[in-house]
Image: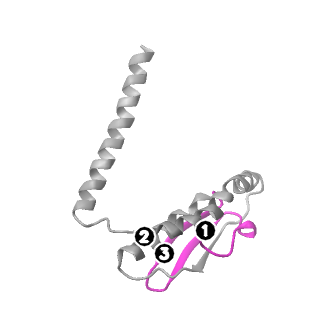
Amino acid sequence: MTRVAAWLSWLAVLFGLWLGATLAEVIRSQGLLRYRVPWRWLRLVWKPLGRVVPDFFVVLWALVRRPQGRFQKLEFPAGGERAVDAGRRAFGVLAPSLAPNRLVVDIDPDTGEALVHDLVPSVAPRELP
């Protein structure tokens, strides 16, 4: 019975991945998923990745202390409508949100600002990568 359950679990996971890949390809083929992330931007990922472990302990400590989180607007040149600009906005949301203390909520391309929530503001970096 455990083999059947394991097989069905793998089937469900892989079927979900297949559906996601199919959906992404359909969206991409219609031109709705146009973005480009230059390889040189990936060198900026080390900062948020380096904050994962320290921020994990900050968040654990925050469970005990219950600090007041803070929303703030940070400068983020979001660009225009080119594929590289859309990639910059996607990178600007995902990369800083890797560390558990910070969540990028939105980037406004018109004002060039990002709305960011920091659970413990005193330990959060003051800029986005």
Q: Farthest residue in the top direction?
A: 1
* SS assignment at label 3: strand
Residue occupied by mark 3: 107
* SS assignment at label 2: helix
Residue occupied by mark 1: 117
Horizontal side, residue 68 vs residue 75: left or right: right
Q: Residue 32 location in percent, x, y?
A: 27, 66
Which kind of residue does numbered mark 3 sit on?
A: Ile
Residue 8's label in the rendered image is none
Q: Residue 27 location in percent, x, y?
A: 26, 59
The answer to whether 48 is drawn above or below residue 11 in the figure is: below
Is residue 64 or residue 100 the one in the foreground? 100
Horizontal side, residue 128 vs residue 4: left or right: right
Horizontal side, residue 61 vs residue 86: left or right: right
- Marks 2 and 3 sit apart, C-alpha to C-alpha, by 12 Å
Residue 87's label in the rendered image is 2
Tag 3–tag 1 contact (CB < 8 Å)? no
Quarter of the image for residue 46 reads bottom right
